[in-house]
Image: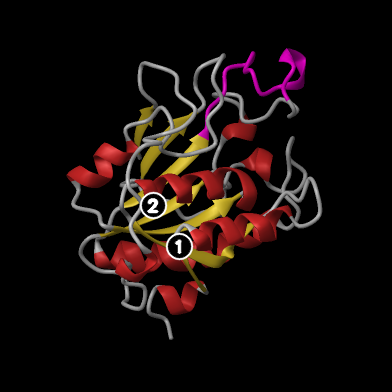
Amino acid sequence: MVTYHGRGIPAVAANAGATVRREGEAVKGRAPGAGDALLIVDVQNDFLPGGALGVPDGDAVIAPLNAALRVFGVAGLPVFSTRDWHPADHCSFVGRGGIWPPHCVAGTEGAGFAPALELASSTVVVSKAVHPDADAYSGFAGTDLAERLSAGGVERVFVGGLATEYCVLNTVLDARREGLEVIVLEDAVRAVEVEAGDGARAIGRMRDAGAAFLPTRTAVGGE
């Protein structure tokens, strides 16, 4: 895998001033092809059931993501996988006044990708939230993901992962700000639900930003 550990400067939001495409401009019905990339968000051990910050039913995203990975692999299309890669004293942890228990500490088993996730060696790994004093929910925040997608001619991303109302939401919103078409693989996301309805509200925000939601088999041309 090709791994990138953010940028040299901390950041929380990416490209906040960029223009979002109107929903009518997004091409949502065609199967993956040239100009497309698969973007997997934080499918890490600590976010799976039994992990330090386990998402209920979080392991259910693996099967549809593997189906998408196989399609993208056969087609030779790019795959990016983000991960939390926190220092041990990260500002989001309760010990520093944050809201989360320690999780996804760089180099630990909890920070590793789910073993059942079929990531090829060509997968580009994007590490985020790598600075002690800056949080980052989006895969675009403090990383060069936007530049890499642009350099690869990517115009549309298929997104799945964990968790719906945090890192998936913020990654999707930033992808739209970058002018990318976005298809969320609706069976490949799961929510934490700190408060009941958080996941549904996040889905509403992503739809309002112009993201489309499709089952994985439909989105990747399996139906």
In x, y percent, where is residue 76? 24, 61
Question: Which structural element holds mark 1?
Answer: loop
Q: Is residue 114 visible?
A: yes
Which sits in the foreground, 81 or 98?
98
Which sits in the foreground, 178 or 120?
178
Report the quarter where the N terminus lies: top left
Q: Is residue 177 above or below residue 24?
A: above
Q: CA distance from mark 1 to mark 2?
A: 8 Å
Which sits in the foreground, 17 or 141?
17
Residue 15 falls in which quadrant of the image?
top left
Predominant secondary structure in magenta? loop
Magenta part of the chain: 84-98
Residue extending farthest bottom = 223
Q: Residue at x 22, y 60 (%)?
A: 35
The mark nearer the N terminus, 1 or 2, is 2
Label annotation for residue 176: 2
The amino acid at mark 1 is Ala
Asked if the stretch drawn in magenta spans residue 172, the answer is: no
User: What number of labels is visible?
Assistant: 2
Density class for disc 1 (Cα within 10 Å; few <14, some 14-19, many ≥20) is many
The amino acid at mark 2 is Arg
Circles 1 and 2: CB atoms closer than 8 Å: yes
Q: Is residue 120 visible?
A: no
Question: Which structural element holds mark 2?
Answer: helix
